[in-house]
Amino acid sequence: MLRELRPAVGSHVVDTRTGRLGIVMGYEGPYVQLRPYGGGREWDAEPGALRTATAAERLKAATAHANARSRGEAL
């Protein structure tokens, strides 16, 4: 888990409460704002509920996004 340290903007983290991988976009009050890999609606997460995404998780997200693009489901 990422302790009370703030993950850097642009880093990939997993919100352990939802299981979603997100990219750190910024901070709003006590929350970290995350956006899904490939874009989409941001969500707020508590810093204590985040952990650094593994290389495998990042690759899985990138592959899923590339597949969605090839099907015309994403930009």
Image: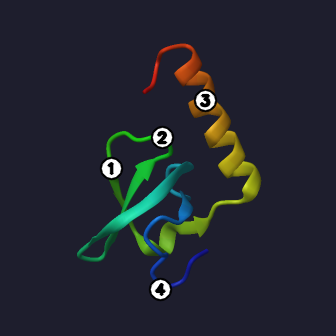
Residue for badge 2 = 38
Pick whichever of labels 3 and 4 is earlier in the sequence.
4
Pick whichever of labels 3 and 1 is earlier in the sequence.
1
Asked whether disc 2 touches disc 3, contact meaning CB atoms under 8 Å apart, the reply is no
Q: Mark on residue 4?
A: 4
Residue for badge 1 = 42
Q: Which tag is nearer the camera, tag 3 or tag 1?
A: 3
Q: Tell me the crowding category of disc 1: few under 14, some 14 to 19, or many 20 or more residues within 10 angstroms, Cα based.
A: some
Pick whichever of labels 2 and 3 is earlier in the sequence.
2
Asked whether disc 2 touches disc 4, contact meaning CB atoms under 8 Å apart, the reply is no
Q: Which tag is nearer the camera, tag 4 or tag 1?
A: 1
Residue 33 appears left or right of 64: left
Residue for badge 3 = 66
Q: Quadrant of the C terminus?
A: top left
For marks 1 and 2, give the CA distance.
Answer: 11 Å
For marks 3 and 1, give the CA distance.
Answer: 20 Å
Query: Outermost residue toward the left?
Result: 29
Q: Amino acid under label 3? A: Ala
Q: Mark on residue 70?
A: none
Query: Outermost residue toward the top?
Result: 71
For marks 4 and 1, give the CA distance.
Answer: 21 Å
